[in-house]
Amino acid sequence: MNTKTLSQLLELSASSHSHLCPRQILGVRMGIFAGDLLNLPLPQHDKRLLVITETDGCFADGLSAATNATVGHRTMRVEDYGKAAAVFVDTQTERAIRIAPAINIRQLACGHIPEEPRHYFAQMKAYQSMPAEIMFNVQTVLLGISLRAILSRPGIRVECEVCGEEIMNEREIIQNGLTLCRACAGTAYYRVPVSIPVYEQMPA
């Protein structure tokens, strides 16, 4: 149950892109559908709904417009699987559902707007008017880690015993008796070439 109209939400999503695209519409429609299924009033004005999006970009902005979940408020997380899908969690009941587009959603869109031969524009129109039950597949899911671990607690900070950098939100790893950040524990998404001094990497 969304307190804003679809056109208002699409306008909000497009405002950060200077255009509207099918993935934004998918994100908005999916967010609206999640609110209906979880019986939550959206866009939210609290932090009850947690959205875990499986890709970033336009789709995530559509989700945010519909739900008011954002990375900054720690109500949206990105698990980049490269999929236009998301898990929606009611943090009070801990009910979690995963919503993904129907496998043949592009074909369904073209069949929904047969008078539009251009697939892109057929999707643009169809995604705004197709029934959500046809557009999306819904699964009840269980989170791989606890909701408490995802949300953490405010004000919790420790320092990594190797690099000295601050770690927030209980994201430290205890390894061989040491409190480490994930990078120093060996799970970094980046690496620093040891043969290049730090000052040589900085721009002039």
Image: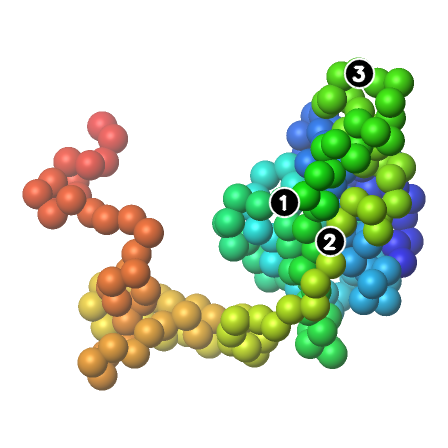
Task: Say which mark, if any, is on residue 98.
Answer: none
**Where the N terminus falls, by quadrant?**
bottom right
Find out whether the residues at labels 1 and 2 contact each other: C-beta distance under 8 Å: no
Q: Amino acid at mark 3?
A: Pro
Using the image as rendered, state which of residue 90 and residue 71 is in the foreground.
Answer: 90
- Label 3 Cα neighbours within 10 Å, binned few <14 / some 14-19 / many ≥20: few
- Label 2 Cα neighbours within 10 Å, binned few <14 / some 14-19 / many ≥20: some
Query: Whole-percent x and y of residue 29?
Result: 80, 45
Per the image, the residue denoted by label 1 is 84
Q: Amino acid at mark 2?
A: Asn
Using the image, determine if residue 101 lies above or below residue 200.
below
Query: Between disc 2 and disc 3, whose residue precedes?
Result: 3
Query: Between disc 1 and disc 3, whose residue precedes?
Result: 1
Query: Whole-percent x and y of residue 111?
Result: 83, 29
State how far apart marks 1 and 3 are (Cα).
Answer: 24 Å
Q: Nearer the observer, disc 1 or disc 2? A: 2
- What residue is drawn where x is 60% and y is 61%? 74
Residue at the extreme left of the image, as rendered: 195
Per the image, the residue denoted by label 2 is 137
- What residue is drawn where x is 74% and y is 78%? 93
- What residue is drawn where x is 8% and y is 43%? 195
Query: Between disc 1 and disc 2, whose residue precedes?
Result: 1
Per the image, the residue denoted by label 3 is 117
Q: Amino acid at mark 1?
A: Ala
Using the image, determine if residue 120 lies above or below residue 105.
above
Query: Whole-percent x and y of residue 26?
Result: 74, 41
Tell me the element at label 1.
loop
Q: Quadrant of residue 104?
A: top right
Q: Is residue 103 left or right of residue 160?
A: right
Tell me the element at label 3.
loop
Find out whether the residues at labels 1 and 3 contact each other: C-beta distance under 8 Å: no
Q: Quadrant of residue 42?
A: bottom right
